[in-house]
Protein backbone atom coordinates (compact mmCIF):
# COMPACT_ATOMS: atom_id res chain seq x y z
CA UNK A 1 0.00 0.00 0.00
CA UNK A 2 1.21 3.51 -0.76
CA UNK A 3 0.20 6.91 0.57
CA UNK A 4 -0.31 9.88 -1.78
CA UNK A 5 -0.81 13.36 -0.34
CA UNK A 6 -2.00 16.32 -2.44
CA UNK A 7 -1.66 19.90 -1.24
CA UNK A 8 -4.03 22.82 -1.67
CA UNK A 9 -2.70 23.92 -5.05
CA UNK A 10 -2.98 20.34 -6.33
CA UNK A 11 -6.73 20.34 -5.64
CA UNK A 12 -7.34 24.10 -5.87
CA UNK A 13 -9.05 23.98 -9.27
CA UNK A 14 -11.57 21.45 -10.65
CA UNK A 15 -9.21 20.42 -13.45
CA UNK A 16 -6.45 19.78 -10.89
CA UNK A 17 -8.80 17.56 -8.91
CA UNK A 18 -9.55 15.67 -12.14
CA UNK A 19 -5.82 15.19 -12.62
CA UNK A 20 -5.40 13.91 -9.06
CA UNK A 21 -8.04 11.25 -9.82
CA UNK A 22 -5.92 10.07 -12.76
CA UNK A 23 -2.74 9.94 -10.67
CA UNK A 24 -4.21 7.90 -7.83
CA UNK A 25 -5.80 5.29 -10.11
CA UNK A 26 -2.61 4.31 -11.94
CA UNK A 27 -1.17 0.90 -11.07
CA UNK A 28 -2.53 -1.96 -8.99
CA UNK A 29 -1.15 -1.11 -5.56
CA UNK A 30 -3.73 -0.04 -2.95
CA UNK A 31 -3.61 3.72 -2.24
CA UNK A 32 -4.55 5.96 0.68
CA UNK A 33 -5.00 9.49 -0.66
CA UNK A 34 -4.64 12.40 1.76
CA UNK A 35 -6.10 15.75 0.66
CA UNK A 36 -5.55 19.25 1.94
CA UNK A 37 -8.22 21.94 1.78
CA UNK A 38 -8.64 23.79 -1.53
CA UNK A 39 -5.95 26.46 -1.87
CA UNK A 40 -6.93 29.64 -0.02
CA UNK A 41 -9.62 27.94 2.07
CA UNK A 42 -7.69 27.57 5.32
CA UNK A 43 -6.59 31.22 5.18
CA UNK A 44 -10.21 32.26 4.58
CA UNK A 45 -11.38 30.13 7.53
CA UNK A 46 -8.71 31.72 9.74
CA UNK A 47 -10.04 35.16 8.75
CA UNK A 48 -13.59 34.07 9.56
CA UNK A 49 -12.49 32.70 12.92
CA UNK A 50 -10.52 35.86 13.74
CA UNK A 51 -13.54 38.06 12.95
CA UNK A 52 -15.82 35.98 15.16
CA UNK A 53 -13.26 35.83 17.98
CA UNK A 54 -13.46 39.63 18.37
CA UNK A 55 -17.25 39.69 18.06
CA UNK A 56 -17.34 41.07 14.50
CA UNK A 57 -20.16 38.81 13.34
CA UNK A 58 -21.11 40.96 10.37
CA UNK A 59 -17.59 40.69 8.96
CA UNK A 60 -17.66 36.96 9.69
CA UNK A 61 -20.90 36.50 7.74
CA UNK A 62 -19.51 38.51 4.82
CA UNK A 63 -16.37 36.34 4.66
CA UNK A 64 -18.46 33.15 4.90
CA UNK A 65 -20.63 34.26 1.95
CA UNK A 66 -17.53 35.04 -0.14
CA UNK A 67 -16.05 31.61 0.51
CA UNK A 68 -19.39 29.91 -0.18
CA UNK A 69 -19.56 31.64 -3.57
CA UNK A 70 -16.11 30.26 -4.42
CA UNK A 71 -17.25 26.72 -3.64
CA UNK A 72 -20.49 27.11 -5.60
CA UNK A 73 -18.44 28.09 -8.66
CA UNK A 74 -15.94 25.29 -8.03
CA UNK A 75 -18.48 22.46 -8.09
CA UNK A 76 -20.03 23.68 -11.34
CA UNK A 77 -16.86 22.60 -13.14
CA UNK A 78 -16.03 19.66 -10.88
CA UNK A 79 -18.97 17.43 -11.79
CA UNK A 80 -21.30 17.39 -14.80
CA UNK A 81 -24.19 14.97 -14.23
CA UNK A 82 -27.22 16.53 -12.47
CA UNK A 83 -27.46 13.96 -9.67
CA UNK A 84 -23.80 14.42 -8.70
CA UNK A 85 -24.01 18.19 -9.01
CA UNK A 86 -26.96 18.11 -6.63
CA UNK A 87 -24.96 15.93 -4.24
CA UNK A 88 -22.04 18.39 -4.35
CA UNK A 89 -24.41 21.32 -3.75
CA UNK A 90 -25.84 19.56 -0.69
CA UNK A 91 -22.35 19.04 0.75
CA UNK A 92 -21.45 22.71 0.29
CA UNK A 93 -24.79 23.81 1.76
CA UNK A 94 -24.31 21.57 4.80
CA UNK A 95 -20.87 22.92 5.67
CA UNK A 96 -21.77 26.56 5.11
CA UNK A 97 -24.97 26.15 7.13
CA UNK A 98 -22.68 25.08 9.99
CA UNK A 99 -20.48 28.16 9.48
CA UNK A 100 -23.51 30.46 9.46
CA UNK A 101 -24.84 28.83 12.65
CA UNK A 102 -21.61 29.50 14.53
CA UNK A 103 -21.97 33.23 13.89
CA UNK A 104 -24.90 33.09 16.32
CA UNK A 105 -23.18 31.30 19.22
CA UNK A 106 -20.35 32.13 21.64
CA UNK A 107 -16.86 31.79 20.25
CA UNK A 108 -14.35 29.40 21.87
CA UNK A 109 -11.05 27.72 21.07
CA UNK A 110 -12.87 24.44 20.44
CA UNK A 111 -15.17 26.21 17.98
CA UNK A 112 -12.12 27.69 16.25
CA UNK A 113 -10.79 24.14 15.63
CA UNK A 114 -14.20 23.13 14.21
CA UNK A 115 -14.09 26.09 11.82
CA UNK A 116 -10.58 25.25 10.59
CA UNK A 117 -11.55 21.61 9.95
CA UNK A 118 -14.20 22.52 7.36
CA UNK A 119 -11.72 22.91 4.48
CA UNK A 120 -10.41 19.33 4.51
CA UNK A 121 -13.87 17.91 5.22
CA UNK A 122 -15.27 19.67 2.13
CA UNK A 123 -12.38 18.92 -0.25
CA UNK A 124 -12.49 15.19 0.46
CA UNK A 125 -16.28 14.89 0.29
CA UNK A 126 -16.43 16.80 -2.99
CA UNK A 127 -13.57 14.73 -4.44
CA UNK A 128 -15.44 11.59 -3.40
CA UNK A 129 -18.49 12.78 -5.35
CA UNK A 130 -16.32 13.30 -8.45
CA UNK A 131 -14.89 9.78 -8.08
CA UNK A 132 -18.43 8.42 -7.81
CA UNK A 133 -19.39 10.21 -11.03
CA UNK A 134 -16.38 8.63 -12.75
CA UNK A 135 -17.33 5.17 -11.49
CA UNK A 136 -14.11 4.83 -9.47
CA UNK A 137 -14.57 2.46 -6.54
CA UNK A 138 -13.26 3.98 -3.30
CA UNK A 139 -13.99 4.52 0.39
CA UNK A 140 -13.91 7.85 2.23
CA UNK A 141 -12.17 7.25 5.57
CA UNK A 142 -12.91 10.08 8.05
CA UNK A 143 -9.61 11.14 9.62
CA UNK A 144 -11.50 12.03 12.79
CA UNK A 145 -12.11 8.31 13.30
CA UNK A 146 -8.43 7.36 13.53
CA UNK A 147 -6.10 10.40 13.69
CA UNK A 148 -5.28 11.20 17.33
CA UNK A 149 -3.05 13.54 19.33
CA UNK A 150 -2.27 13.01 23.01
CA UNK A 151 -2.45 15.36 26.01
CA UNK A 152 0.87 16.90 24.91
CA UNK A 153 -0.59 17.61 21.44
CA UNK A 154 1.75 15.06 19.89
CA UNK A 155 0.50 12.34 17.48
CA UNK A 156 -0.48 9.12 19.27
CA UNK A 157 1.02 6.76 16.69
CA UNK A 158 0.07 3.47 18.46
CA UNK A 159 -3.59 4.59 18.62
CA UNK A 160 -3.50 5.81 15.01
CA UNK A 161 -2.05 2.50 13.85
CA UNK A 162 -4.67 0.43 15.70
CA UNK A 163 -7.69 2.49 14.68
CA UNK A 164 -6.63 2.92 11.03
CA UNK A 165 -5.83 -0.74 10.45
CA UNK A 166 -9.12 -1.75 12.08
CA UNK A 167 -10.93 0.51 9.60
CA UNK A 168 -8.98 -0.80 6.59
CA UNK A 169 -9.78 -4.42 7.49
CA UNK A 170 -13.47 -3.61 7.02
CA UNK A 171 -12.85 -3.11 3.27
CA UNK A 172 -10.66 -6.04 2.13
CA UNK A 173 -11.56 -5.69 -1.56
CA UNK A 174 -11.14 -1.87 -1.80
CA UNK A 175 -7.93 -0.50 -3.29
CA UNK A 176 -8.53 3.25 -3.03
CA UNK A 177 -9.14 5.23 0.15
CA UNK A 178 -9.57 9.00 0.58
CA UNK A 179 -8.99 10.85 3.84
CA UNK A 180 -8.41 14.32 5.25
CA UNK A 181 -5.05 15.80 6.10
CA UNK A 182 -4.39 18.18 9.01
CA UNK A 183 -7.44 17.39 11.15
CA UNK A 184 -7.59 15.00 14.11
CA UNK A 185 -9.17 14.42 17.51
CA UNK A 186 -7.36 15.45 20.70
CA UNK A 187 -7.10 13.63 24.05
CA UNK A 188 -10.44 15.14 25.09
CA UNK A 189 -12.18 13.76 22.01
CA UNK A 190 -12.56 17.23 20.44
CA UNK A 191 -11.82 18.20 16.85
CA UNK A 192 -8.25 19.49 16.64
CA UNK A 193 -5.40 19.69 14.13
CA UNK A 194 -1.77 18.62 13.69
CA UNK A 195 -0.53 22.22 13.37
CA UNK A 196 3.12 21.74 12.30
CA UNK A 197 3.26 20.37 8.79
CA UNK A 198 -0.49 19.77 8.59
CA UNK A 199 -1.43 17.38 5.81
CA UNK A 200 2.18 16.31 5.16
CA UNK A 201 2.33 15.17 8.77
CA UNK A 202 -0.91 13.22 8.30
CA UNK A 203 0.51 11.44 5.26
CA UNK A 204 3.73 10.50 7.05
CA UNK A 205 1.84 9.23 10.10
CA UNK A 206 -0.47 7.13 7.93
CA UNK A 207 2.52 5.77 5.98
CA UNK A 208 4.15 4.73 9.26
CA UNK A 209 0.89 3.25 10.61
CA UNK A 210 0.31 0.99 7.59
CA UNK A 211 4.04 0.41 6.86
CA UNK A 212 3.52 1.82 3.36
CA UNK A 213 5.83 1.08 0.44
CA UNK A 214 6.19 4.83 -0.16
CA UNK A 215 4.78 8.17 1.02
CA UNK A 216 4.34 10.55 -1.92
CA UNK A 217 3.95 14.28 -1.23
CA UNK A 218 2.52 15.99 -4.34
CA UNK A 219 2.87 19.77 -4.55
CA UNK A 220 3.44 22.37 -7.28
CA UNK A 221 7.26 22.04 -7.14
CA UNK A 222 9.26 19.19 -8.70
CA UNK A 223 11.02 18.10 -5.51
CA UNK A 224 13.43 19.76 -3.11
CA UNK A 225 15.88 22.07 -4.90
CA UNK A 226 19.56 22.70 -4.27
CA UNK A 227 18.77 26.34 -3.44
CA UNK A 228 15.78 28.61 -2.95
CA UNK A 229 14.16 29.00 -6.42
CA UNK A 230 12.30 32.10 -5.19
CA UNK A 231 15.61 33.90 -4.62
CA UNK A 232 18.20 32.27 -6.88
CA UNK A 233 17.78 32.23 -10.66
CA UNK A 234 19.13 28.78 -11.49
CA UNK A 235 18.37 25.79 -9.24
CA UNK A 236 18.04 22.06 -9.78
CA UNK A 237 15.98 19.37 -8.07
CA UNK A 238 17.86 16.92 -5.83
CA UNK A 239 17.21 13.29 -6.78
CA UNK A 240 18.01 11.66 -3.43
CA UNK A 241 18.44 12.76 0.19
CA UNK A 242 18.82 10.88 3.45
CA UNK A 243 16.19 11.42 6.14
CA UNK A 244 18.78 13.35 8.19
CA UNK A 245 19.72 15.63 5.28
CA UNK A 246 16.06 16.33 4.50
CA UNK A 247 15.34 17.10 8.16
CA UNK A 248 18.22 19.60 8.27
CA UNK A 249 17.02 21.32 5.10
CA UNK A 250 13.42 21.44 6.28
CA UNK A 251 14.38 22.83 9.68
CA UNK A 252 16.62 25.50 8.20
CA UNK A 253 14.16 26.94 5.74
CA UNK A 254 13.32 24.60 2.81
CA UNK A 255 9.59 25.38 2.57
CA UNK A 256 8.49 22.30 0.63
CA UNK A 257 8.45 20.11 3.76
CA UNK A 258 8.08 20.72 7.49
CA UNK A 259 10.83 19.06 9.60
CA UNK A 260 8.39 17.15 11.81
CA UNK A 261 6.83 15.44 8.79
CA UNK A 262 9.85 13.27 8.10
CA UNK A 263 10.07 11.65 11.52
CA UNK A 264 7.16 9.12 11.37
CA UNK A 265 8.22 7.79 7.94
CA UNK A 266 11.84 7.63 9.10
CA UNK A 267 10.87 5.51 12.12
CA UNK A 268 9.39 2.85 9.82
CA UNK A 269 11.96 3.43 7.05
CA UNK A 270 9.24 4.40 4.55
CA UNK A 271 10.70 6.33 1.58
CA UNK A 272 9.20 9.80 1.05
CA UNK A 273 8.92 11.18 -2.49
CA UNK A 274 8.38 14.87 -3.25
CA UNK A 275 6.60 15.12 -6.61
CA UNK A 276 5.00 17.78 -8.82
CA UNK A 277 1.32 17.50 -9.72
CA UNK A 278 1.88 19.89 -12.65
CA UNK A 279 4.78 17.78 -13.98
CA UNK A 280 3.99 14.20 -12.88
CA UNK A 281 6.71 12.71 -15.08
CA UNK A 282 9.48 14.68 -13.29
CA UNK A 283 11.67 12.53 -11.00
CA UNK A 284 11.25 14.77 -7.99
CA UNK A 285 13.17 14.00 -4.78
CA UNK A 286 13.33 10.69 -2.93
CA UNK A 287 14.06 10.83 0.81
CA UNK A 288 15.24 7.54 2.27
CA UNK A 289 17.72 5.98 4.69
CA UNK A 290 20.61 6.10 2.20
CA UNK A 291 22.08 9.49 1.24
CA UNK A 292 22.96 8.31 -2.27
CA UNK A 293 26.14 10.39 -2.51
CA UNK A 294 28.57 12.45 -0.44
CA UNK A 295 29.22 16.17 -0.53
CA UNK A 296 27.06 19.29 -0.58
CA UNK A 297 23.47 18.71 -1.74
CA UNK A 298 21.59 21.93 -1.01
CA UNK A 299 21.41 25.31 0.67
CA UNK A 300 18.53 26.61 2.79
CA UNK A 301 17.87 29.94 4.48
CA UNK A 302 15.93 30.66 7.66
CA UNK A 303 14.85 34.28 8.23
CA UNK A 304 13.68 36.12 11.33
CA UNK A 305 16.70 35.12 13.41
CA UNK A 306 17.86 37.03 16.50
CA UNK A 307 21.48 36.76 17.69
CA UNK A 308 22.20 37.17 21.41
CA UNK A 309 25.79 37.60 22.67
CA UNK A 310 26.67 37.40 26.38
CA UNK A 311 30.14 38.84 27.00
CA UNK A 312 31.70 38.16 30.41
CA UNK A 313 35.44 37.72 30.98
CA UNK A 314 34.68 37.14 34.67
CA UNK A 315 32.12 34.34 34.43
CA UNK A 316 32.37 32.50 31.09
CA UNK A 317 34.96 29.95 32.24
CA UNK A 318 33.30 29.50 35.61
CA UNK A 319 31.82 26.07 36.31
CA UNK A 320 28.11 25.95 35.44
CA UNK A 321 28.02 29.24 33.53
CA UNK A 322 26.66 27.78 30.27
CA UNK A 323 24.11 25.74 32.18
CA UNK A 324 22.76 28.91 33.79
CA UNK A 325 22.55 30.61 30.40
CA UNK A 326 20.65 27.70 28.84
CA UNK A 327 18.28 27.50 31.80
CA UNK A 328 17.06 31.01 30.95
CA UNK A 329 16.02 29.88 27.46
CA UNK A 330 14.48 26.69 28.86
CA UNK A 331 12.45 28.73 31.35
CA UNK A 332 10.87 30.70 28.50
CA UNK A 333 10.52 27.65 26.21
CA UNK A 334 12.65 29.31 23.55
CA UNK A 335 14.71 27.04 21.30
CA UNK A 336 18.29 27.81 20.30
CA UNK A 337 19.33 27.25 16.66
CA UNK A 338 23.07 28.04 16.71
CA UNK A 339 25.69 28.49 19.42
CA UNK A 340 29.33 29.60 19.38
CA UNK A 341 31.69 30.22 22.30
CA UNK A 342 35.02 31.95 22.95
CA UNK A 343 37.02 32.67 26.08
CA UNK A 344 35.03 35.77 26.86
CA UNK A 345 31.67 35.38 25.12
CA UNK A 346 28.91 33.02 24.10
CA UNK A 347 26.57 33.74 21.17
CA UNK A 348 23.27 31.98 20.46
CA UNK A 349 20.47 32.47 17.96
CA UNK A 350 16.72 32.17 18.41
CA UNK A 351 13.81 32.47 15.99
CA UNK A 352 11.10 33.29 18.53
CA UNK A 353 11.03 36.90 19.86
CA UNK A 354 8.05 36.43 22.20
CA UNK A 355 10.06 36.48 25.45
CA UNK A 356 13.12 38.37 24.21
CA UNK A 357 12.83 41.18 26.80
CA UNK A 358 12.46 38.72 29.67
CA UNK A 359 15.38 36.60 28.41
CA UNK A 360 17.67 39.63 28.09
CA UNK A 361 16.70 40.84 31.57
CA UNK A 362 17.64 37.49 33.11
CA UNK A 363 20.89 37.23 31.12
CA UNK A 364 22.17 40.71 32.08
CA UNK A 365 23.53 39.64 35.52
CA UNK A 366 25.88 37.25 33.66
CA UNK A 367 27.56 39.95 31.56
CA UNK A 368 27.05 42.48 28.76
CA UNK A 369 24.20 41.36 26.47
CA UNK A 370 24.16 42.42 22.82
CA UNK A 371 21.25 41.83 20.45
CA UNK A 372 21.32 41.66 16.64
CA UNK A 373 17.94 41.35 14.94
CA UNK A 374 17.06 40.79 11.26
CA UNK A 375 19.57 37.98 10.82
CA UNK A 376 19.38 34.93 8.53
CA UNK A 377 20.80 31.45 9.00
CA UNK A 378 22.23 30.03 5.77
CA UNK A 379 22.65 26.26 6.01
CA UNK A 380 24.79 24.20 3.66
CA UNK A 381 23.53 20.62 3.85
CA UNK A 382 24.89 17.36 2.50
CA UNK A 383 26.30 13.95 3.37
CA UNK A 384 29.61 13.86 5.27
CA UNK A 385 30.34 17.43 4.21
CA UNK A 386 32.64 17.95 7.21
CA UNK A 387 34.89 15.28 5.67
CA UNK A 388 34.48 16.31 2.02
CA UNK A 389 37.64 17.79 0.51
CA UNK A 390 37.70 21.52 -0.26
CA UNK A 391 34.12 22.22 0.89
CA UNK A 392 35.20 24.82 3.46
CA UNK A 393 37.63 26.45 1.03
CA UNK A 394 35.01 26.71 -1.72
CA UNK A 395 32.42 27.97 0.76
CA UNK A 396 34.48 30.79 2.25
CA UNK A 397 36.11 31.72 -1.06
CA UNK A 398 32.59 32.20 -2.46
CA UNK A 399 31.41 34.51 0.32
CA UNK A 400 34.59 36.43 1.20
CA UNK A 401 32.68 39.72 0.69
CA UNK A 402 29.83 38.78 3.10
CA UNK A 403 29.97 39.93 6.76
CA UNK A 404 29.41 36.56 8.47
CA UNK A 405 28.22 36.98 12.08
CA UNK A 406 28.50 33.33 13.28
CA UNK A 407 29.63 29.93 11.96
CA UNK A 408 28.45 26.53 13.19
CA UNK A 409 30.58 23.63 11.96
CA UNK A 410 31.11 20.10 13.26
CA UNK A 411 27.94 19.77 15.32
CA UNK A 412 26.39 17.70 12.54
CA UNK A 413 28.05 15.69 9.75
CA UNK A 414 25.35 17.02 7.43
CA UNK A 415 25.36 20.76 8.08
CA UNK A 416 27.50 23.90 8.04
CA UNK A 417 25.52 26.97 9.14
CA UNK A 418 26.32 30.65 8.74
CA UNK A 419 24.61 33.64 10.30
CA UNK A 420 24.49 36.74 8.09
CA UNK A 421 22.52 40.00 8.19
CA UNK A 422 19.24 39.43 6.33
CA UNK A 423 20.10 42.19 3.86
CA UNK A 424 22.90 39.93 2.54
CA UNK A 425 20.70 36.81 2.19
CA UNK A 426 20.09 36.99 -1.57
CA UNK A 427 23.70 37.80 -2.37
CA UNK A 428 24.95 34.99 -0.12
CA UNK A 429 22.65 32.40 -1.70
CA UNK A 430 23.67 33.45 -5.20
CA UNK A 431 27.39 33.40 -4.38
CA UNK A 432 27.11 29.95 -2.80
CA UNK A 433 25.09 28.69 -5.78
CA UNK A 434 28.00 29.65 -8.02
CA UNK A 435 30.81 28.64 -5.68
CA UNK A 436 29.45 25.25 -4.58
CA UNK A 437 27.38 24.16 -7.57
CA UNK A 438 28.78 26.18 -10.48
CA UNK A 439 25.30 27.60 -11.17
CA UNK A 440 24.67 31.30 -11.84
Image: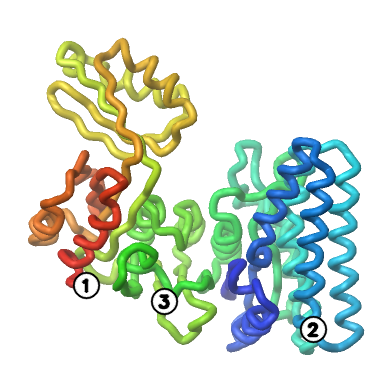
Q: Quadrant of the N terminus?
A: bottom right
Q: Position of residue 191 (x, y in %)?
A: 75, 48
Pointer 3 local density, CA inside 10 Å: few below 14, some 14–19, many at least 20 = many
Eye-nearest disc, 3 or 1: 1
The residue pinned by badge 2 equals 79
Pointer 1 local density, CA inside 10 Å: few below 14, some 14–19, many at least 20 = some
Asked if residue 343 is positioned above or below residue 416 in the image, the reply reads above
- Mark 3 or 2, nearer chain start: 2
170 or 253: nearer the viewer: 253
- Please tell me the numbered disc located at residue 284: 3
* Colouring mode (rainbow / by chain / secondary structure / one colour): rainbow
- Please tell me the numbered disc located at residue 268: none
Instruction: Name the residue: 76% across, 70% down.
Output: 140
Instruction: Name the residue: 34% across, 62% down.
Output: 231
Asked if residue 110 is positioned above or below residue 28 in the image, the reply reads above
Label 3: which secondary element: loop
Distance from label 3 to label 2 (Cα)?
A: 31 Å
Q: Position of residue 63 (x, y in %)?
A: 77, 54
Distance from label 2 to label 1 (Cα)?
A: 45 Å
- Mark 2 or 1, nearer chain start: 2
Examine the image and state in which quarter residue 54 appears: top right
Q: Taking 352 as reference, is 406 left or right?
A: left
Q: Taking 29 as reference, is 145 left or right?
A: right
Q: Are marks 3 and 1 in contact (CB under 8 Å)?
A: no
- Please tell me the numbered disc located at residue 439: 1
Pointer 2 local density, CA inside 10 Å: few below 14, some 14–19, many at least 20 = many
Q: Position of residue 399 (x, y in %)?
A: 15, 54
Label 2: which secondary element: loop
Eye-nearest disc, 3 or 2: 2
- Mark 3 or 1, nearer chain start: 3
Amino acid sequence: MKVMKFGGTSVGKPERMHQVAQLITQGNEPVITVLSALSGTTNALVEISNALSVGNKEEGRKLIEQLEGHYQNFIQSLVQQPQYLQKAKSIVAEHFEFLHIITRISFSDALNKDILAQGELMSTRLFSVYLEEQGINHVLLPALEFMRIDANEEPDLPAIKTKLNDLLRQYPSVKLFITQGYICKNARGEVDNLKRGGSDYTASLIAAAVNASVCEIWTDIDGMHNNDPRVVNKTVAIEQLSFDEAAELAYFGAKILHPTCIWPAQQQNVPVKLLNTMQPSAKGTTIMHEAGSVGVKAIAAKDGIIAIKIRSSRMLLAYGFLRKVFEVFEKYKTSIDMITTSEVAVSVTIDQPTYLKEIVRELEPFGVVEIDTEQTIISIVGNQIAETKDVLKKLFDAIHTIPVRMVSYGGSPHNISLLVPSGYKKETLQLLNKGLFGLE
